[in-house]
Amino acid sequence: MIAKAGTPMVRLVAIEDMRRRRGYGMFKGKIWMSPDFNELPDDVALAFGIDPKEERAARRAAEKRHRAKRKP
């Protein structure tokens, strides 16, 4: 309560939360990512001095390690 000279002038009240809560999985089935999303085109790899064959082999090895960690 806000008062002036002891007389109540304003009452403070809580407002409702107007934001809608978003649940997990609301975009499930609506988003798609290409399987080659992380692929680096050969011409770009060469421009940066990266051997495309070595880069692909390194990525495969990293993916294999990642999959091995996820399995119990």
Image (cartoon, helix red, strand yellow):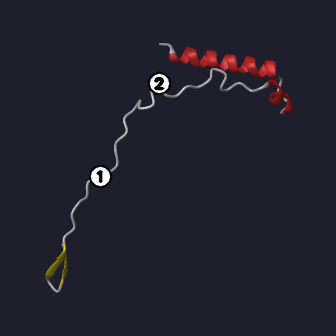
Left of 18 or right of it: where is 4? left
* Vertical order, 69 against 7 (above or below): above
Nearest to the observer: residue 72 or residue 32: 32
Say which residue appears at 67% left-offset and 22% top-offset: 36
Q: Quadrant of residue 32?
A: top right
**Secondary structure of residue under mark 1:** loop
From this viewpoint, which residue is outermost toward the bottom?
5
The x and y percentages for residue 69 are 54, 18
The x and y percentages for residue 53 are 80, 18
Three-letter code, disc 1: Asp
Three-letter code, disc 2: Gly
Question: Which image quadrant: the N terminus?
Answer: bottom left
* Vertical order, 39 against 67 (above or below): below
**Secondary structure of residue under mark 2:** loop
The x and y percentages for residue 46 are 85, 28
Q: Of the numbered discs in the image, which one, if any, rests on residue 38? A: none
Which residue in the protein does label 1 denote?
Answer: 17
From this viewpoint, which residue is outermost toward the front?
30
The x and y percentages for residue 38 are 67, 26
Which residue in the protein does label 2 denote?
Answer: 29
Q: Residues within 10 Å of mark 2 (few under 14, many from 20)?
A: few
Left of 5 or right of it: where is 46? right
Q: Report, in whole angstroms, how far the alpha carbon at label 2 lies from the one at label 1.
A: 29 Å
